[in-house]
Image (cartoon, rainbow, N blue to C red):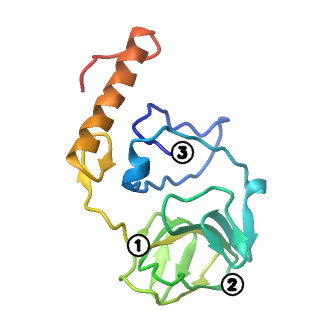
Amino acid sequence: MRAGKGIWHSAGAGEPGRTRGFQLWIALPPHLELGDSQSVYQSASDLSQAGPARVLLGEYGGAKSSITAPSPINYLAVALRAGERWRYQPPEAHLVLWLAMGKGRVNAPDILEHGEIVVFEPGEAAVEFVAQDDAEFVIGSAVPHPHELVLGYYSVHTSPRALEFGEAHIQHIRRGLVEQGRLRGELSR
């Protein structure tokens, strides 16, 4: 989902039952941050795969996402069996690298366990993973965002003017939903 100038959404996972999910929020470049919102829905079978990695955004090992990323980024869902090794080499200029463990444990070289989120030291160095037991994680690498970020209540933008416009648009959407009876609550924060 690209929020653009603002959206109102729920974070439901669809059908009832057990599920595990990750949300990745990416700061948009100025030419996209006040644009229209956009949503793309894909199933696991729609994703390209290279070895144990499904490509959610970007490209890896000859596999490429069908979603156009707003900036140079890779975001992969990786599943390893106990004892399996996997090495991730970030592309050139991808100085930012992070990981979120969804299941199991891996050695990278420290032990990373279910529920942990890790931000690696900046750089382009490869990371080797060895699964201690069956493990699943998401890993991302990116070129550093080239703009200062202005943090708001609902969103992040690259200028105070863009933040003000985006948050005003979100309040406009909220008021419309309350007036239609689709949302309960006060019209202010």
**Which amino acid type is marked by label 1?**
Val
Disc assigned to residue 84: 2
Image location (x, y in percent) of residue 68:
60, 57
Q: Is residue 95 above or below residue 189?
A: below
How packed mark 3 is, by other alpha carbons closer than 10 Å (few <14, some 14-19, many 20 or more), is few
Task: Please report whichever mark, 2 or 1, sits nearer to the chain's N-terminal start.
Answer: 2
**Label 3 element class:** loop
**Which amino acid type is marked by label 2?**
Glu
Which-is-in-front pick, marks 2 and 1?
Answer: 1
Q: Is residue 65 left or right of residue 151?
A: right
Q: Is residue 163 above or below residue 50?
A: above
Image location (x, y in percent) of residue 16:
65, 35
Quadrant housing residue 51: bottom right
Q: Residue placed farthest to the left in the image?
A: 160
Residue at position x 28%, y 43% from top? 162
Image location (x, y in percent) of residue 40:
63, 44
Question: What residue sits right under mark 1 in the picture?
Answer: 118
Task: Please report whichever mark, 3 or 2, sits nearer to the chain's N-terminal start.
Answer: 3
Quadrant (top left/top right/bottom left/bottom right) for the N terminus: top right
Disc assigned to residue 147: none
**Which amino acid type is marked by label 3?**
Met
Q: Is residue 141 above or below residue 34?
A: below
Residue at position x 47%, y 56% from top? 24
Question: What residue sits right under mark 3 in the picture?
Answer: 1
**Label 1 element class:** strand
Residue at position x 71%, y 74% from top? 52
**Label 2 element class:** loop
